Image (cartoon, grey):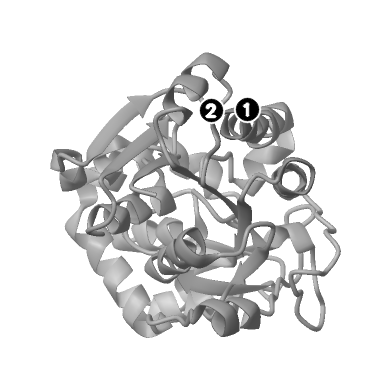
Amino acid sequence: MDKIIVTGGAGFIGSHFVRRLLAADDVAEVTVLDSLTYAGHKENLEDALLSPKLSFVRGNIIDQELVDELVQRHDAIVHFAAESHVDRSFFEAATFLTTNVLGTHTLLDAARRHGIQKFVHVSTDEVYGPLPTGSASEQSPLKATVPYAASKACSDLLALSAFRTDGLPVCVTRSSNNYGPGQHPEKIIPLFVTRLLKGLSVTVHGSGQHVRNWLHVEDNCRAIELVLRRGIPGEIYNVGGGTDLTSAELTGRLLRIFDADWSAVTYVPDRKSNDIRYSMDWSKIADDLGYGPSWSLDAGLAQTVEWYREHPERWAPVIRDVEAPLAEINVAPGAEG
């Protein structure tokens, strides 16, 4: 697998993964396919664009001719490209279905025709739906609540059906909420960080008791690379191991980093379909592939805050355009953003 396509490679998680591949001695060529929507920026790749191993193609994964031309020249596909913002999915559901479902179908169809050696489909814990107690295993039923999660659940099933019907070597990863440097400021951690850097208030929905597992992006990328290299075709791998926090607990951690108090926080009515808790059992990838997280939440948040502090040119123009509507919501991020 020396030639790899990374869809959505100019996005948050995808760009971190691209750098990881470029550092691997046995990877000869990485092609990023990205349509550069609001959450995808070539700047996310930074100096990786200088690597002779990297090719960048601006295009959409629903473009059958383009996808076919690229896939026939590569050995593997790692598929990050997706619409991933929960709140946007409420009023742009058709866009989510087009990208997340039809786009995945286009990639799978080309992968079948050209004998791709490995197809890793990157998904989210949100497909399992809310779990007031317990944790979802890879065999748990899919009970997606919001349109975003429903579109990802559908794309997961498409990918797995390609293995079952055609023997396409597909693996699916489902991770908990990622965070880290370079994430689009519509997601809750960079949104709060950038607003606190500007001396602005932040909002918490409902009573602040919604639980999410926070996983550093580099830990997720390491897990995805393990699945690319050693994952068994047809298998699903939950990727967790971060820290479970309520939204109020997360807010408190960020306030402490900035030496701010709760006067900077406004509680607002809960948004619709705000699942109370997500939780996954990730023992399978730990036992089978030797995965384990390396980032503590304290270290990861400190690194993340420092990145936003040092790179205002990367987020200030974006947050200026989006902070007014986003100040009214408390997002529940998906796997990619």
Q: Position of residue 281 (x, y in %)?
A: 68, 80
- Tell how many labels: 2
The residue lying at 70 percent from left, 35 percent from top is 101
Residue closer to the observer: 83 or 325: 83
The vertical placement of 251 against 65, above or below, is below
Q: Amino acid at mark 2?
A: Ile
The residue lying at 54 percent from left, 41 percent from top is 325
Sort mark 1 into few (<14), some (14-19) or many (20+) by Cα contacts within 10 Å. some
Residue closer to the observer: 91 or 232: 232
The vertical placement of 257 against 117, above or below, is below
Q: Kindly check if marks 2 and 1 are in contact, taking CB atoms under 8 A apart as contact.
A: yes
> Quick check: 291 left or right of 31?
right
Sort mark 2 into few (<14), some (14-19) or many (20+) by Cα contacts within 10 Å. many
Q: Position of residue 229 (x, y in %)?
A: 45, 62
Q: Quadrant of residue 244?
A: bottom right
Residue closer to the observer: 293 or 309: 293
What residue sits right under mark 1 in the picture? 106
Q: Which mark is residue 61?
A: 2
The residue lying at 41 percent from left, 75 percent from top is 254
The residue lying at 37 percent from left, 55 percent from top is 17
> Quick check: 161 left or right of 2?
right
Q: Position of residue 290 (x, y in %)?
A: 49, 82
> Quick check: 330 left or right of 151?
left
Q: Amino acid at mark 1?
A: Thr
Q: Which mark is residue 140?
A: none
Q: CA distance from mark 2 to mark 1?
A: 7 Å
